[in-house]
Amino acid sequence: MVRTRRRAPRGQRAIRQPWHRQPGADAQAGRGAAPHPDLGDSVSRADLTDLNHEIGVDPSTFQPVNIDRARIRGVEVQADWHNRDWRIGGQLTAMEPLNLSPGPDYRNVLNRRARQSASLSLRRFLRAPVLEGTSGSIGVVGRWEGRRYDDLANTLPMGGYLSVDLLTQWALGNGWSLEARAANLFDRNYQTAAYFAQDGRHYGLTARYQTRGK
């Protein structure tokens, strides 16, 4: 396991897909550290980010609000294990996102940022015995976000939520692939911004075709 401490530039965001390992993630976070032979890949990070002129949102007017100074301290732990048939990945984040601008909101929590969050994914690789050359996978992804505030004054709390998605992907050959998804599988009622409820249980089906290069 690797520990790093860094000062991130303004506005930097880490976006990760739980089904796909980031290319070069070990080299970036651990300066070339090799993954553990039994646990797969595991990385922990300790971050300190100073932000100047961060942009927030006033939920009463829906207008942007300037935040002169903010600070985010946090620890993030990621783990990934896989073999020929299975892949399991997880992420746990704990952070302290504070507004350090002088005024009545000094040292309040930045709006729409949870102090704790986590994700867990489980994926099973499949091979169709009937259609030669067809392969796919089925998996489940769970995401949890802790309590947040929608305003800088911290007077509009939003409860934490858990969302679970079920996905399956199939490569059909000749450049064709198919993906089906059942999102918010347990039909949870939650908000990522005040007054804007997220969709309940919903489904999607996507077909893709990729041309082959010469």
Image: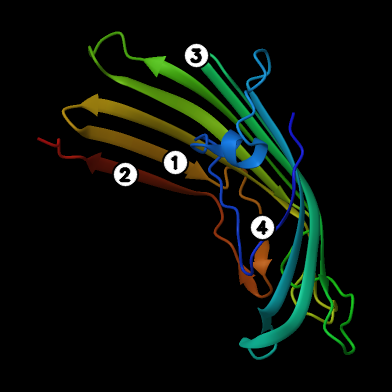
Give the crowd class for mark 2: few <14, some 14-19, many >=20 residues within 10 Å: few
Q: Dot 3: what SS?
A: loop
Residue at mark 1 to residue at mark 4: CA–CA distance: 18 Å
Q: Which residue is mark 1?
A: 181
**Nearer to us in this view, 199 or 133:** 133
Counting from the top left corner in percent of width and height, residue 69 is at 77, 79
Q: Amino acid at mark 1?
A: Arg
Residue 171 lies in what quarter of the image? top left
Label 2 and label 3: CA atoms lie apart by 24 Å
Q: Earlier in the sequence, mark 3 or mark 1?
A: 3
The label shown at residue 206 is 2
Q: Residues within 10 Å of mark 3 (few under 14, many from 20)?
A: few
Quadrant of the drawing holding the N terminus: top right
Q: Which residue is mark 3?
A: 85
> Looking at the image, is mark 1 or mark 4 earlier in the sequence?
1
| Residue identifier under label 4 | 189
Residue visible at 32% across and 14% down in the picture: 128
